[in-house]
């Protein structure tokens, strides 16, 4: 059976009486059938004499027939290649005749929608130029043309349609407005991001000044959307390419590529390191910022935008294996919230460890504390760290920080950066008590910050629940040590499973005396993100529960100033710390719904009767959001309650 890519050999020149676009429609239908069903397609003709299909009747059971009236097709059985007029013909396709090479492409499809403005009007009104551009674009990527044509529109401009093997392209031009719209659909499994630069080079032709005194025309500007087509899961197509690493799936597609609200999207880089696929993107989310304001910020017209261009910049976003990790407009909130709550809960943090943190922003926040003498950062992917230094220099910028010894936080004299497996690094040094005996006191850490992959990742989950690693964290902390980790999306009221349970249980077992969970909803992840703070000593609870005035004094004492005079902290302050002190009610609900814990029932009885049973409180778990929310600042094992203030719900 003839494959779709050879449809051009089956369709002859067009009869003058047959309107030309009909053949284009037939060609397009041929391509669509090939896309959807992943099978061979051909146009077959009826013999001149009998009016029967040239196929055995017993083969028709698994075939589909689409009647086409009045079509002239080439009689393949006629060596003279004469044309014959048929009263009826069929597209006939059979899934059993699919080529073996087509199996891997079943259910695969990618679509690229592109709009370009400020394009040369003469180019947009030239049929010859448009055809050449369309052919040049796809021929460069080894797509063979099957058929193509351009049709003049009523007033000005063209609509052009091209059918290529494995691809269909449609484009529409609007010369009066300097706009071209392009739609490219392929059946190939590879994404079309690489086409963007070529499309811009072929179609983004700038306007030319007619007279030398004319004002300069604005340069062409391109917006685009990339979509993954077809029901991939229903066809059994995996979300990941060979090796199990996502390329354009997940949040990268959901949040950026397929969203028309993100304008001026640009891929800064895509690199496949030894451990992960890394994407860097620039974009403007028109829900929060406008392209017009951004363009105005680049001018020197004295406007507010031009005087404060830092407020109207394009956003930068980094993705690891398709999942969003950090953004320019959300990273300060995330990293300040992760670091400073834990740092302020230690009385005098001098030595700090960072697990992960390859972007450098966690390191930047730690170095803002005057008490810090050494920061050890361990990240397994050294190539990713170098990429972040190149494409996200703002994340690790210490140039404005008084006391820093280098423009980049990675080069600060207090920084020690190791490109190793951080989990194994801690296990080798602190896993057992015997190993701990060989460690000098100055080698323990006052604060350990976990800024690694999301805990929903199977690999990381396995390490998180490994008691050996958790023991190494506990043993690696000083007596007043504090551990903090981001633990993924916040729990919901409808969630039947507490996603933080594995952390809480394990950390209680190894000996952490107090744990606290808090949410941060402004980190650019579209939903709140949870953090877990584990205190090695319950005495540190006093520092966690400082009032706002005490916290503000500590911030002023500890945080370094800047050369520019701007605040060193953009988001975190005493009021933010106060909001972290009590867990959200959803954590209480989930905690008590998981199992009928006696301390939940006992606490509700105490609240109901306006009494406090210190013994019950002292025998409770290290993590109990019910107590945290309803009985403020109690001191376990000291036999007294510092405050008998209740928060009535």
Image (cartoon, rainbow, N blue to C red):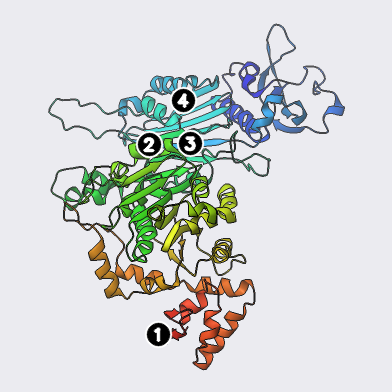
Judged left or right of residue 287, residue 423 is: right
The secondary element bearing badge 3 is classed as strand
Disc ID at residue 643: 1
Out of 487 and 553, give the one closest to the viewer.
Answer: 553
Residues marked 4 and 1 touching at CB (< 8 Å) = no
- For label 2, count other residues whose C-alpha is less than 10 Å away and answer few (under 14), some (14-19) or many (20+): few
- For label 3, count other residues whose C-alpha is less than 10 Å away and answer few (under 14), some (14-19) or many (20+): many
Residue 493, quarter of picture: bottom right
Disc ID at residue 386: 2
| Disc with the residue nearer the chain's start (1 vs 3) | 3
Out of 79 and 516, give the one closest to the viewer.
Answer: 516
Q: CA distance from mark 3 to mark 4?
A: 20 Å
The residue under the point 52% across, 80% down is 618
Disc ID at residue 112: 3
| Disc with the residue nearer the chain's start (1 vs 2) | 2
The residue under the point 29% across, 66% down is 573
* Residue 562 location (% of width, % of height): 19, 54
Residue 334, above or below 581: above
Residue 644, above or below 490: below
Residue 323, above or below 556: above
Residue 442, above or below 505: above
| Disc with the residue nearer the chain's start (3 vs 2) | 3
Q: CA distance from mark 1 to mark 3?
A: 61 Å
Out of 196 and 407, give the one closest to the viewer.
Answer: 407
């Amino acid at each position: 059976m003839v494959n779709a890519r050879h449809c051009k050999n089956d369709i002859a020149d067009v009869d003058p009486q047959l309107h030309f676009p009909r053949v284009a429609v037939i060609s397009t239908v041929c391509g669509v059938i090939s896309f959807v069903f992943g099978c061979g397609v051909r146009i077959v003709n009826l013999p001149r004499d009998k009016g029967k299909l040239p196929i055995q009747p017993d083969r028709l059971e698994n075939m589909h027939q689409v009647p086409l009236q009045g079509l002239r097709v080439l009689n393949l059985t006629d060596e003279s290649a004469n044309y014959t007029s048929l009263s009826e013909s069929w597209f006939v396709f059979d899934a059993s005749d699919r080529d073996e090479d087509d199996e891997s492409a079943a259910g695969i499809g990618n679509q690229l929608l592109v709009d370009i403005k400020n394009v040369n009007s003469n180019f947009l009104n030239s049929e010859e130029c448009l055809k050449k551009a369309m052919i040049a674009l796809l021929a460069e990527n080894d797509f063979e043309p099957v058929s193509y044509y351009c049709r003049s529109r009523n007033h000005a401009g063209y609509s052009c349609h091209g059918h290529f093997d494995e691809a269909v392209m449609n484009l529409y031009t609007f010369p009066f407005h300097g706009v071209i719209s392009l739609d490219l659909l392929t059946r190939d499994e590879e994404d079309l991001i690489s086409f963007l630069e070529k499309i811009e080079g072929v179609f983004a032709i700038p306007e030319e000044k007619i007279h030398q005194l004319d004002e300069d025309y604005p340069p062409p500007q391109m917006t685009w959307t990339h979509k993954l087509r077809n029901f991939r899961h229903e066809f059994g197509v995996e979300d990941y390419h060979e090796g199990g690493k996502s390329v354009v799936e997940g949040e990268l597609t959901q949040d950026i590529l397929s969203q028309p609200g993100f304008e001026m999207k640009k891929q800064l880089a895509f690199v496949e390191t030894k451990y992960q696929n890394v994407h860097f993107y620039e974009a403007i989310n028109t829900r929060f910022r406008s392209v017009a304001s951004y363009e105005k910020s680049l001018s020197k017209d004295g406007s507010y935008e031009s005087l404060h261009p830092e407020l109207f910049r394009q956003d930068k976003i980094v993705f690891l294996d398709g999942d969003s990790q950090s953004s320019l407009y959300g990273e300060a909130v995330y990293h300040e919230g992760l670091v400073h709550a834990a740092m302020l809960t230690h009385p005098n943090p001098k030595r700090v460890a960072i697990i992960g943190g390859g972007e450098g922003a966690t390191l930047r926040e730690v170095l803002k504390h005057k008490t810090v003498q050494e920061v050890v950062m361990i990240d397994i992917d050294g190539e990713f760290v170098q990429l972040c230094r190149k494409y996200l220099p703002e994340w690790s910028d210490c140039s404005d920080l008084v006391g820093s010894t280098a423009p980049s936080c990675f080069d600060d004299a207090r920084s020690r950066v190791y490109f190793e497996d951080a989990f194994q690094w801690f296990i080798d040094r602190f896993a057992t008590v015997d190993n701990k005996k060989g460690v000098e006191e100055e080698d323990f850490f006052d604060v350990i910050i976990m800024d690694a992959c999301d805990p929903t990742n199977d690999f990381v989950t396995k390490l998180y629940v490994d008691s050996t690693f958790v023991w190494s964290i506990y043993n690696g902390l000083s007596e007043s040590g504090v551990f903090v980790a981001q633990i993924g999306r916040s729990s919901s009221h409808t969630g039947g499973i507490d996603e933080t349970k594995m952390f809480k249980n394990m950390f209680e077992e190894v000996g952490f005396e107090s744990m606290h969970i808090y949410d941060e909803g402004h980190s650019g992840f579209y939903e709140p993100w949870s953090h877990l703070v584990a205190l090695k000593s319950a005495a540190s609870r006093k520092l966690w529960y400082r009032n706002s005035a005490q916290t503000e004094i500590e911030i002023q004492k500890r945080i370094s100033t800047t050369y520019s005079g701007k605040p060193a902290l953009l988001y975190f302050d005493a009021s933010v710390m106060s909001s972290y002190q009590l867990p959200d009610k959803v954590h209480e609900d989930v905690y008590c719904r998981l199992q009928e814990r006696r301390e939940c029932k006992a606490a509700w009885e105490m609240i109901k009767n306006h009494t406090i049973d210190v013994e019950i409180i002292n025998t409770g778990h290290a993590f109990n959001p019910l107590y945290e929310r309803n009985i403020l600042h109690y001191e376990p094992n000291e036999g007294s309650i510092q405050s008998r203030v209740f928060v009535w719900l």
